[in-house]
Amino acid sequence: MLLTWSPPARGRRAPRRGVFMGSGTRLRLEPYEVALLRGGPRAAVTVAVLALYLRGAAEAGRPGTVRVSGEPVGAGQALSPLAEAVLAELRQPVGVRELSGRPGVRRAVADIRRGLMAAGLLRCLPARRTRAGRRTLDALHAGHPLPRDRKTLSADEAPMAVALHGDPALRLVAGRFALRAGLIPRVEVADKGLLRHSPRSEYSCGGVSD
């Protein structure tokens, strides 16, 4: 498998990441898709919240919540359907756990899950990654190791780092915001521990098991 990625040029929509399988089939994965593949629905929603924060559209509300802070900066760079669904729910402060269960957000995550299933990266029964899904994550990790310094990441690269590496990358990229907004716990907890509390729904078979 060969993985390629390059930051998007300013003033246009970010290009989708290209993953080339051994058969020559090209899969294109965005950070929120990688996050769902790695960590399930809550991980995908967390990446969407981070993307909104980095574009100036979201901020921490009262402790443990997120709220809207303005229109997203970056004219010409459209939001993903998941980020749009999340943004629509931020008119009032809301916690990420509750946010993940809102109908519009659930539908957006379900659409992502169906796309990953159609690409052969996830299967529903039982809910887990396929062999191709595991290989895709392995290739992405090899090409994008956890950065040691926030300064090495651009705003365009940060969501992919968090999608791949979860809480450690989130602490590096936007630690203060993530703690205040309740995106990460103040005590280190493994991703699987967090996912036990993800709302069960029609997209719960997005799965993170190997």
Image: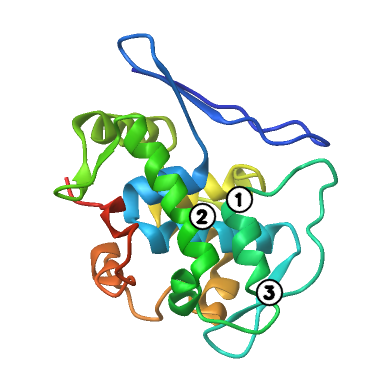
Q: Residue furthest top?
A: 24
Mark nearer the viewer, 3 or 1: 1
Q: Which SS class for mark 3?
A: strand
Any part of residue 42 in sight: yes
- The amino acid sitting under disc 1 is Pro
Asked whether disc 2 touches disc 1, contact meaning CB atoms under 8 Å apart, the reply is yes
Q: Amino acid at mark 3?
A: Glu
Establish if 115 lies above or below 73: above
Image quarter (top left, top right, bottom left or bottom right) of the C terminus: top left
- The residue that appears at 59% across and 42% down in the rendered structure is 157
Q: Which mark is residue 108?
A: 2
The colour scheme is rainbow
Q: Earlier in the sequence, mark 3 or mark 2?
A: 3
Going by the numbered disc 2, the residue's amino acid type is Ala
Label 1: which residue?
81
Residue 192 location, x and y as percent? 24, 64
Pointer 3 with pointer 1, Cβ within 8 A: no
Query: Judging from the image, what secondary structure is the residue with disc 1 in?
Result: helix
